[in-house]
């Protein structure tokens, strides 16, 4: 188990209201415990998004293609602070200006590792230059590539097994963002049901 599996995550109900905490490892044991997470999409001036192929050592969905960066805020931690921390750890970049474009709840079991993702996922976007320098950590990231998000949507349907099961929902929120909220750090405040996108092949 990696050191990060012992970190704490914030448990939430289906409206995003916190009600406790658990370790990363415990939250991802079957059947999964709903917890707060974030998914970052880095977008270049042409509208392409940076994908990462998850490293072989990942405990959930290794070697699947996923969005630029994912993670969990610690209980009570700002989403943007947590996301910039993970961008630095995984990709060697940041800090960047982040905006929340939507939230949704998803559940997915990894048949290869037996772990379960059950997350109240805040989708965050950052606009970055086309020549953005990156220094990916090989323990986190196998490789990187830039893709057109609409072409990616088509490939998610054609070859879902190549992608992490949350990616479709993340891309959907990027292309169809929710209206901005008064509190930019949390577009869907606690007590408001998230839009639960129907699970699609390859979709998070």
Image: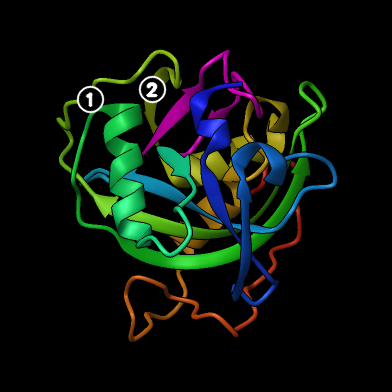
Q: Which residue is mark 2?
A: 144
Of residues 189 and 198, the one drawn nearer to the viewer in this rendering:
189
Residue 95 shows in the view: yes
* Residue at (65, 80) in percent of width and height: 193
Q: Bounds of the magenta span?
A: 48-67
Q: Which quadrant holds residue 61?
A: top right
Q: Which quadrant holds residue 21?
A: bottom right
Q: Is residue 182 left or right of residue 119?
A: left
* Residue at (63, 35) in percent of width and height: 164
Q: Main secondary structure of the magenta part?
A: loop
Give the Cα distance between marks 2 and 1.
9 Å
Q: Which residue is mark 1?
A: 134
Counting from the top left corner in percent of width and height, residue 7 is at 51, 40
Of residues 200 and 166, the one drawn nearer to the viewer in this rendering:
166
Query: Is 78 located above or below residue 93 in the figure?
Result: below
Instruction: Say whether marks 2 and 1 touch (CB < 8 Å).
Output: yes
55 part of magenta stretch: yes
**Dot placed on the residue nearer the N-terminal end, 2 or 1:** 1
Query: Is 191 located above or below residue 102 in the figure?
Result: below
Q: Is residue 141 left or right of residue 106?
A: left
Counting from the top left corner in percent of width and height, residue 185 is at 34, 70
Q: Residues within 10 Å of mark 2 (few under 14, many from 20)?
A: some
SS label for mark 1: loop
Of residues 1 and 196, the one drawn nearer to the viewer in this rendering:
1
Q: Which quadrant holds residue 117?
A: top right
């Amino acid at each position: 188990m990696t050191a990060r599996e012992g970190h704490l995550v914030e448990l939430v109900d289906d409206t995003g209201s916190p009600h406790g905490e658990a370790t990363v490892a415990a939250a991802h044991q079957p059947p999964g415990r709903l917890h707060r997470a974030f998914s970052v999409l880095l977008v270049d001036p042409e509208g392409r998004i940076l994908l990462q192929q998850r490293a072989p050592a990942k405990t959930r969905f290794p070697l699947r293609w996923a969005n630029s960066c994912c993670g969990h805020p610690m209980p009570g931690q700002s989403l943007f602070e947590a996301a910039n921390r993970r961008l630095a750890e995984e990709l060697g970049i940041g800090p960047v200006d982040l905006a929340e474009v939507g939230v949704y709840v998803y559940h997915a079991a990894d048949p290869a590792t037996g772990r379960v993702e059950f997350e109240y996922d805040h989708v965050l976007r950052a606009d970055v230059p086309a020549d953005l320098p990156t220094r990916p950590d090989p323990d986190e990231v196998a490789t990187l590539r830039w893709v057109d998000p609409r072409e990616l949507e088509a490939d998610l349907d054609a070859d879902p097994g190549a992608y992490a099961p949350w990616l479709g929902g993340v891309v959907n929120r990027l292309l169809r963002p929710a209206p901005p909220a008064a509190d930019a750090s949390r577009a869907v405040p606690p007590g408001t049901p998230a839009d639960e996108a129907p699970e699609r092949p390859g979709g998070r």
